[in-house]
């Protein structure tokens, strides 16, 4: 199953880091936060990724093109005309497609643009700027159990994200973007979609968190997987420093690939 990662925004709220590179490429522990997200999915056996790039998309392509150089020891032998040998100690089992989905394209428009890569299949999607310890296999099993078009992951936090009205059985009755949380469940990404989602995505101006999710909620086709564990976005420099501190202290909850 393919995993779609939204990585096209400019990240204006963390401009100290994103001025020179896309926000998903801002590093935590020497690796882009995008890499951390991919490592989590890979731990659960999901290794095919479609990255929806936009702002400075060439940075993402170059990083993956040189992945072995960045993650392994390298010998440069100038007695042999600069012959280069990569000592491959690290090789992820990944297949990565980096798609240029446009600099100004909205979230729904980015997903619409990669429709040809999905081939009518169920797929997963999340934002390229937040990490968590969600059990992705349990998330997928929950999605498959209810038969609806879409599942999102929700947590209860005091933040300004997409606010949800959820029934006792997990159905999302309404989706209200950018309201004060006040202890209400919020949308943190880590979604699962049936390919019918593309019927709700019109063009580059489509904001996923607006009309598409609102329509799905109104028709009973949007479900919520409640996550009671860790989740943290990286919208600001303070949040970046918080994640970096956790990583350096060896207390990063999202490092499931080391803990299990």
Image: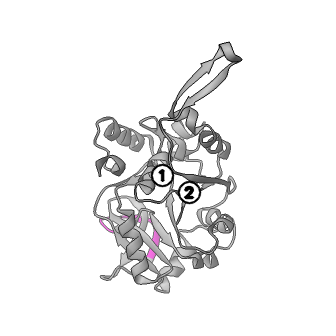
What residue do we see at 52% from left, 35% from top?
88
Q: Kindly state the secondary structure of the residue where label 2 is placed.
A: strand
**Mark 1 sits on what residue?**
38
At label 1, counting other C-alpha atoms closer than 10 Å, the crowd grade (few under 14, some 14-19, many 20 or more) is many
At label 2, counting other C-alpha atoms closer than 10 Å, the crowd grade (few under 14, some 14-19, many 20 or more) is many
Name the image colouring.
Answer: one colour
Horizontally, residue 245 falls left or right of residue 8, namely left
Q: Kindly state the secondary structure of the residue where label 1 is placed.
A: helix
What residue do we see at 66% from left, 15% from top?
78
**Mark 2 sits on what residue?**
49
- Point out residue 197 in the picture as x, y percentages from the top left corner: 58, 76
Whether residue 40 appears in magenta in the rendering, the answer is no
Chain part drawn in magenta:
175-184
Q: Who comes first in sequence, dot 2 or dot 1?
A: 1
Horizontally, residue 6 falls left or right of residue 79, namely left
- Among the 4 quarters of the image, the one containing residue 248: top left
Whether residue 179 appears in magenta in the rendering, the answer is yes
Q: Is residue 57 above or below residue 190?
A: above
């Amino acid at each position: 199953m393919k995993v779609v990662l939204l990585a096209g925004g400019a990240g204006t709220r963390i401009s100290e880091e994103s001025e020179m590179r896309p926000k998903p490429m801002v590093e935590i522990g020497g690796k882009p936060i995008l890499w951390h997200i991919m490592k989590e999915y890979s731990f659960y056996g999901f290794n095919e990724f479609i990255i929806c790039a936009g702002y400075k998309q060439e940075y993402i392509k170059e990083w993956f093109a040189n992945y072995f150089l960045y993650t392994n020891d390298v010998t440069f032998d100038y007695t042999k005309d600069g012959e280069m040998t990569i000592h491959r100690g690290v090789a992820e089992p990944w297949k990565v497609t980096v798609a240029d989905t446009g600099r100004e394209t909205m979230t729904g428009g980015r997903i619409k643009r990669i429709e040809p890569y999905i081939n009518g299949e169920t797929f997963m999607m999340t934002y390229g700027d937040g990490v968590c310890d969600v059990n992705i296999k349990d998330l997928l099993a929950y999605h498959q159990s209810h038969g609806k078009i879409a599942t999102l992951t929700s947590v209860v936090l005091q933040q300004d994200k997409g606010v949800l009205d959820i029934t006792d059985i997990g159905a999302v009755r309404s989706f209200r973007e950018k309201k004060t949380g006040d202890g209400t469940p919020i949308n943190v990404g880590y979604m699962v979609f049936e390919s019918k989602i593309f019927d709700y995505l019109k063009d580059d101006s489509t904001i996923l968190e607006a009309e598409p999710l609102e329509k799905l909620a109104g028709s009973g086709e949007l479900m919520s997987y409640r996550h009671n564990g860790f989740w943290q976005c990286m919208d600001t420099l303070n949040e970046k420093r918080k994640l970096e501190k956790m990583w350096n202290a060896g207390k990063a909850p999202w490092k499931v690939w080391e803990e299990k």
